[in-house]
Image (tube, rainbow, N blue to C red):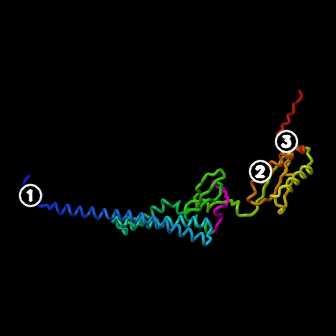
Amino acid sequence: MLLILLNAASAVDFGQVAEKLLNWGMETGKNILAAIVIYIVGRFIIRQIMKLVSKILVKRDFEVSVQTFLKSLLSILLNLVLAFAIISKLGVETTSLAALLASAGVAIGMALSGNLSNFAGGLVILVFKPFKVGDFIDTTNNEVSGTVKEIQIFHTILTTVDNRLIYVPNGTLSSNAIVNYSRQEMRRAEWVFGVEYGMDFERVKAVIDRLIAADSRILKEPAPMVALSSLSASSVDIKVRAWTKVADYWDVYFDFNKAVYETFNKEGIGFPFPQLTVHQAKD
């Protein structure tokens, strides 16, 4: 038996085996090295293309929301092309790989149906423009509000007033109600001030009118309104409506609250406290 094994071993040309292994190793090494070079060069080219596209979009004065969407989409496509080039260089048959991906496309599409709807929602947002980068919006269904920082292919990034980043799916934004506070130039501020029963309404109204006239940020047109709103259980409620520029809204709102509080105290106009009248029955 040993003699047979020795004869078989001698029949094998170890030199040829070693040469084939060496050739295979060198070819594989060259392919791996070439794939690394392709990756490095490809990433450099992608960065240059993205910079060039960014300059063109800025030069052509595209909206920031359109710029962020197109750059995000282009980046994904270019990286996919680079990935296919690297895979092809490593010796993987891209034709069969493409066929495999196509056959799995239905399953992947079903699994990623939410992302596909988000992509479609991003296109709807770009075409119909319910908002753009820089607008302050409120998503009524999600109870999320903030300034639009970026519109990507799947999500819109909002910056909240306390500087948090919120990623809202584009599908949700395109299919639900959105309040855009930045689209109009003016915004109406509204206050309700409660005063004690027995106060002269015309006197209170004159004080409020004086405060409105003293604030240059409150617009004269449309004209402000001061009216007796309701007779509540413990107060006479006075409603005030005034228009400001969108950029001045919150400053005017808080400053006017402070001005009314300080002035009412100086003028002797009392703010009511909740009251409860108790009647005691006689025996």
Q: Is the magenta stretch mostly helix, strand or loop?
A: loop
Q: Quadrant of the C terminus?
A: top right
First-in-chain label (2 vs 3): 2
Hey, which residue is sitting farthest bottom in the picture? Answer: 60
Task: Identify the residue at horizontal 64%, vertical 68% (top origin).
Answer: 128
Quick one: label 1 or label 3, which is nearer the N terminus?
1
Observer-nearest residue: 79 or 231? 79
Q: From the viewer's perspective, is the residue at label 2 or at label 3 nearer?
A: 2
Residue 26: image location, x then y, percent: 28, 63
Q: Distance between the residues labelled 1 and 2?
A: 100 Å
Q: Earlier in the sequence, mark 1 or mark 2?
A: 1
Span shown in magenta: 128-143
Residue at the spot of label 3: 272
Q: What residue type is labelled 2?
A: Phe
- Horizontally, residue 4 falls left or right of residue 257, namely left
Identify which amino acid the numbered label 1 is placed on.
Asn
Residue at image point 65% right, 65% down? 130
C-alpha separation, residue under disc 2 versus residue under disc 3 = 20 Å
* Residue 202 pos. (x, y %): 92, 51
- Residue at the image point whose x is 90% and y is 43% from the top: 268
Label 1: state its secondary structure. Answer: helix
Quadrant in the picture for residue 13: bottom left
Q: Quadrant of residue 278?
A: top right
* Residue drawn 83% across the image and 40% down it: 273
The kind of residue tagged 3 is Pro
Q: Residues within 10 Å of mark 2 (few under 14, many from 20)?
A: few
Say which of marks 1 and 3 sits in front.
1
The residue that mark 2 highlights is 254
Which residue in the structure is indicated by mark 1?
7
